[in-house]
Image: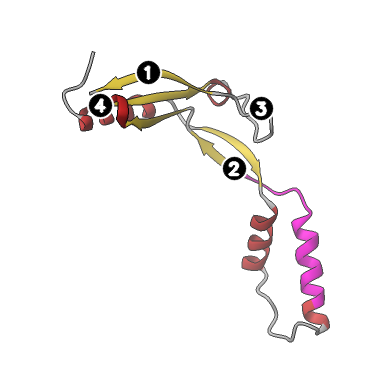
């Protein structure tokens, strides 16, 4: 079964995508994200870079960046991707996200599989 236009196929795929609720999980922040977060919460002192105040601030930033800091993330177990050469939108699904076993670590991210075709 095909759709009469690309936009019709796209909206059908988007509707299919939104039928699954987003799943929340904890994601550990990367080093640069932790440093950025620290700088937002603790502005750099207005001092020359050799001053004790700056040295102390840099030490605190490094200590903060070495902590395990997680943030909640919501992720959809489905997504759509246009495949122009075959005139279709592909509907991908990830069972690890769908069943709540997804973790942001190697080997626990699940696989994205094509489960639907929205041809136009």
Specify which label sits upstream in the sequence, 4 or 2. 4
104 over 38 or under it: above or below: above
Q: Secondary structure at mark 1?
A: strand
**Residue drawn where x is 27% and y is 31% of the image:** 10
Kindly identify which residue carries mark 3. 108
- Earlier in the chain: of badge 4 and badge 3, it is 4
Pointer 3 local density, CA inside 10 Å: few below 14, some 14–19, many at least 20: few
Looking at the image, which residue is at 77% across and 52% down? 67
Q: Who's the residue at 56% across and 34% down the image?
A: 24
Where, by quadrant of the figure, is residue 57 drawn? Answer: bottom right
Residue 105 in percent (x, y) is at 68, 34
Q: In terms of sequence position, does the residue under pointer 4 or pointer 1 come before the other?
A: 4
Q: Earlier in the sequence, mark 2 or mark 1?
A: 2
Horizontally, residue 20 falls left or right of residue 102, namely: left
**Mark 2 and mark 3: Cα distance apart in space:** 17 Å
Which residue was labeled with disc 2?
72
Q: Which residue is mark 4?
A: 9
Please tell me which of labels 1 and 3 falls first in the chain. 3
Q: How is the image coloured?
A: secondary structure
* The magenta stretch spans residue 68: yes
Q: Report the magenta stretch's main SS.
A: helix
Segment colored magenta: 55-72
* Disc 2 residue crowd, few under 14, some 14–19, many 20+, Cα 10 Å: few
Q: CA distance from mark 1 to mark 3?
A: 23 Å
At a point 63% along the width and 62% down the height, the residue shown is: 36
Which residue lies under the disc numbered 1? 116
């Amino acid at each position: 079964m095909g759709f009469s236009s690309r936009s019709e196929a796209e909206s059908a795929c988007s509707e299919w995508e939104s039928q699954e609720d987003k799943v929340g999980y904890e994601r550990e922040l990367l080093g640069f994200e932790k440093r950025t977060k620290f700088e937002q919460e603790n502005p750099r002192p207005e001092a020359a870079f050799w001053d004790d105040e700056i040295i102390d601030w840099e030490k605190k930033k490094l200590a903060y960046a070495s902590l395990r800091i997680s943030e909640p993330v919501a992720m959809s177990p489905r997504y759509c991707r246009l495949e122009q050469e075959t005139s279709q939108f592909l509907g991908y699904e990830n069972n690890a996200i769908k069943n709540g076993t997804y973790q942001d670590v190697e080997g626990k991210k699940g696989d994205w599989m094509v489960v639907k075709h929205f041809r136009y």
